[in-house]
Image: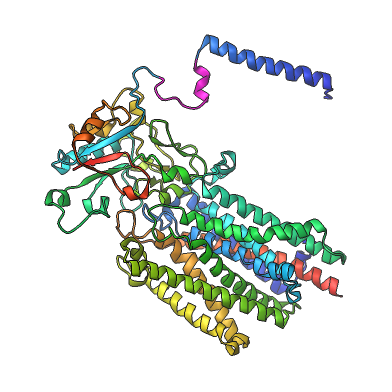
Amino acid sequence: MLEKALQGNKAYWGWIASLLVVIGIGFGFYVYQLQQGLGVTGLNRDVSWGLYIGQLTYMVGIAASAVMLVLPYYLHNHKAFGKLVIFGEFLAVSAVVVCLLFVVVDLGQPQRLMNVILYPTPNSVLFWDMVVLNGYLFLNIIIGWSVLHAVKKGVRPASWVKVLIYVSIPWAVSIHTVTAFLYAGLPGRYFWHDSLLAASFLSGAFAAGPALLLLILMIVQKVSDLKIPKEAIQTMTKIITYAWAINLFMVLLKIFSAYYSQYPAKMAAFDYMFGGYGGEQLMPWMWNFVFLGVVSLALLVIPATRNNPVTMTIALVMVFVAGWIDKGLTMVIAGFIPNPFKVHTEYWPTIPEVFISVGVYAVGLLILTVLYKVALAVQRESAS
Amino acid sequence: MAINRRTFLKAAGLTTLAGVAGHAAMELLAPGALEASGPSKVGEYPEALTAKRWAMLIDTEKFTTAQVYQKCVDACHILHNVPHIPGDQEIKWLWTDSFKHAFPDQQHALVPDRIKNQPFLVLCNHCDNPPCVRVCPTKATFKRDDGIVMMDMHRCIGCRYCMAGCPYGARSFNFWDPRPFIENIDPYYPTRMKGVVEKCTFCEDRLAKGQLPACVEASEGALIFGDLANEDSEVRRVLRERYSLRRKPSLGTNPHVFYLI
């Protein structure tokens, strides 16, 4: 079926070519980082994870959000999602590939990557993160590909595929939970050490992931013959609304428990993020997060703006960007500030770091484009 | 070449025999040599200093001037080829910070001037329950039976999870190739490569040769090092007599560096 990705018009090939150029530039910067060391990044002794690990965290959520299509379709027989489930699964595939690549570009000695498998260490959450991420990747590749094959042949998917689909539902929850445990299980990192973390990760992901998927599908609808059923849009935006409301509620819970208790170490992270105490790098981002979060929630809650294509699109973009500020940027960095000595060392990504990250995203988009191209071609053929 | 069952069994049998016999022969001719490939054993050498549980005491009353501290830091860093990298990507095994920073939960407005104004030595605490060991995905950082938390720099993949896990900021990452930043390379201790994490090892290399840690030797009696499990040891005697503090005891890591106040 993959050969279907080789047929396309000028715009398609232009898109592919520009992705390849971006990947090439990113790879060039990666070679530079490989030669020089991670010193070319803005990371330091105190803030030892930054943009790369933030992107890993955010994209795990995007991958996990595929379950928001799979679950209603397979468990509740929500027919409107029928043709869209495959796009959710293929978005998960490319998102997980992006996650794994961000782990690789973050390593100081990437050629030793296999040590994680050669010396399996069950006491490390990172080991389990590797297990669940790779497992989820294979699950979605196998499920997506075999379901598509069945569509092509005009038959029902094999029953073992159904089993894998049911397995993939809790598995999707596990990938974001385990990723949250990477942070929540550390002593002395007060901002992360939070039993709510996994739950708030999931709620944020179940809003931002479907928001991204819907935005991508609207673009796909413009450039192809895909038709998104109106009912599907309505269900998805409702899911996004509830998940987003729960996510913002959890932000308020954290702020309450920090400030009402007056626990200094808990307050320090929020003081820094919102008040700029000890530095101002994240402050404008956090207030933007608040603005985007509140306005998008209002747009989503009010039925008139939720069902209006223009205001809905604006709300989706806002949710996606706010989600990125929250998990892709500030969550990881703020966990390290202030450091164990209560000293504020700031971090900001460097140019190589940004270009490497953009390059990794371009790899994800390339995989997404190819998979979507195949899925669209197969669905078109089977319809005719 | 075709191989039938008979040949295979013959070959397999011979190989097993050779393996067993080879092992026996090695044991006979060079006892203990094969163990080098097994788990490392503390105290293989007769002159080595051994303990059931190593601990360090820092006598803050004896550290009267910043120079004494600097002597300890220099002794450690020169001996272990710790590079001097300016800026926030530096490498530190043993360094000093204020009371306020070393004990962030114990500072208050009326801390005595001596305590408030003097620098405090900080280093890896060689915890009983080390978070860095718990989080490491490759066992590159591990705890020895005698309590020393070690780094295998050849195993480390540079994920820096241990740095996130350590609540004492005791770990450094080689953001750059450290070698150009070392003034005089000591040929008796390995230099590191870029992309790996490193930290204080309680001078396990010196203990194996029967020497005290470099900082202890340079401290003119201000640092005491010994076996906490041995009731007659000096560390136990001093801890019985003097009041001591540990960094962040509430985190449950059980640090084994004690500050005598």
Whether A298 is drawn above or below B76: the answer is below
Q: Residue furthest top?
A: B29
Regarding residue B79, the answer to whether it shows in the image is no
Quick one: A110 or A308, which is closer to the camera? A308
Whether B188 is drawn above or below A187: the answer is above
Percent across and percent down for residue A240 are 59, 75
Percent across and percent down for residue B45 are 39, 19
Q: How is the image coloured?
A: rainbow
Give the quadrant of the N terminus of chain A.
Answer: bottom right
Q: Looking at the image, how many numbered discs can be counted on the residues? A: 0
Regarding residue B155, the answer to whether it shows in the image is yes
Percent across and percent down for residue A64 are 61, 63
Q: Is residue A205 magenta?
A: no
Q: Tell me the residue at 57%/41% (across/down).
A: A120
Horizontal relation, residue A135 to residue A103: left or right: right
Q: Is residue B34 magenta?
A: yes
Whether A11 is drawn above or below A199: the answer is below
Q: Quadrant of residue A304?
A: bottom right
Horizontal relation, residue B218 to residue A5: left or right: left
Give the prevailing secondary structure in the magenta stretch: loop
Q: Tell me the residue at 13%/41% (across/down).
A: B64
Give the quadrant of the C terminus of chain A.
Answer: bottom right
Extent of the magenta region: B32-44
Percent across and percent down for residue A71 are 69, 67
Horizontal relation, residue B56 to residue B251: left or right: left
Horizontal relation, residue A227 to residue B73: left or right: right
Whether A258 is drawn above or below A225: the answer is above
Q: Quadrant of residue A70?
A: bottom right
